[in-house]
Amino acid sequence: MSQNLLKGKKGIIFGALNDQSIAWKTAEICYQQGAQIVLTNAPIALRMGEINKLAEACGNAPVIGADVTNMDDLKNLFEKSMEHFGGTIDFVLHSVGMSMNIRKGNMYTGLNHDFQHKTFDISAMSLHRVCQVAYELDAMSEWGSIVALTYIAAQRVFPDYNEMADAKALLESIARSFGYHYGVKKKVRINTISQSPTRTTAGSGVKGFDGFINYAEKMSPLGNASAEDCANYCAVMFSDMTRMVTMQNLFHDGGFSFTGVTQAVIEQMEK
Ligand SMILES: NC(=O)c1ccc[n+]([C@@H]2O[C@H](COP(=O)([O-])OP(=O)(O)OC[C@H]3O[C@@H](n4cnc5c(N)ncnc54)[C@H](O)[C@@H]3O)[C@@H](O)[C@H]2O)c1
């Protein structure tokens, strides 16, 4: 059901790979809530062609390729988006993550450091790049909202989440630091949403994901938050209903982050 929360708003959505992606659901919800959007992903991901279906379903949204590690790509993305919208951008979703160490099965204690560098560049520094490009081009509207997706491994150890844990800690810190500067300059807010484990291409790549997601389900009073739930939360964060929220890491996890133990886990342990 649409409440027209985002009527008249214009946003860029990074990271819709397929219909399981959190970014995919967010694009759909933002469009339903009245927003106009531009979709972007790495040129290699665009070659799969899936994103064109989403673009069509979102009012023929433009699709503009950009590798988040490339400043020229990002500059081109923001310039073309402003041209398309005929003005500044109200919201940005950063929904990007990648670790070659996870893909190759390297353990945290035996990382390939070139891969680690790439992980930090794609999964964390990219938020700084996006914010800096927007800042330098003065591309965001006053009270605009930038959201990046993160995971609780930034605060607590989840051994198989590997170096992505460190990348998420950096990502959350960049949201705070840039959030300060962008807030002062133009009242632009920057937050991270810390989402439950979710079955997506990136999520399922983590070793032991099935055990991981079932454990989180049992440890959350409300159960795991789905990708659709996360998309709804993103839409609220892009709306004017959350104007004074900035520099926060917002847990969106059914209560997992503040639960010590649940009856379901106790029963499992007693078996
Ligand atoms: N799935 C989960 O369990 C979970 C939980 C918490 C947070 N998150 C975070 O949510 C975000 C979205 O992930 P998802 O789960 O929807 O998976 P996904 O695989 O659908 O999305 C990841 C996206 O990152 C893009 N990407 C990778 N390298 C890129 C590059 N160089 N330039 C531009 N884009 C690039 C991919 O093409 C893909 O679209 C990530 O930040 C992820 O860490 C996921």
Image (tube, rainbow, N blue to C red):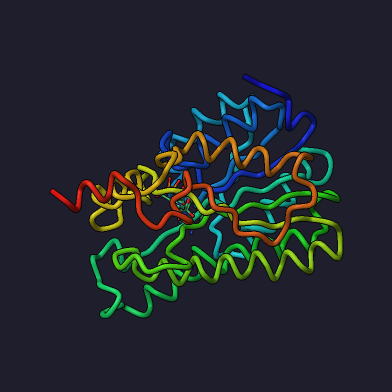
Q: Nearer the viewer, residue 132 or 151?
A: 151
Count of numbered tags: 0
Residue at the outermost left position: 271
- Residue at 59% from the left image edge and 30% from the top image edge: 29
| Horizontal and vertical percent position of residue 270 | 16, 51
Residue at the outermost top position: 1
Which quadrant is home to the N terminus?
top right
Q: Nearer the viewer, residue 116 or 195?
A: 195
| Horizontal and vertical percent position of residue 144 | 78, 49
Position of residue 150 relative to residue 28, above or below, is below
- Residue at 69% from the left image edge and 71% from the top image edge: 177
Figure quadrant of residue 109? bottom left
Figure quadrant of residue 81? top right
Q: Is residue 228 left or right of residue 4?
A: left
| Horizontal and vertical percent position of residue 157 | 37, 69
Q: Nearer the viewer, residue 192 or 43?
A: 192
Position of residue 245 relative to residue 19, above or below, is below
Q: Is residue 111 left or right of residue 88?
A: left
| Horizontal and vertical percent position of residue 182 | 79, 63
- Residue at 40% from the left image edge and 46% from the top image edge: 220
Position of residue 262 relative to residue 162, above or below, is above
Position of residue 229 relative to residue 173, above or below, is above
- Residue at 51% from the left image edge and 57% from the top image edge: 150
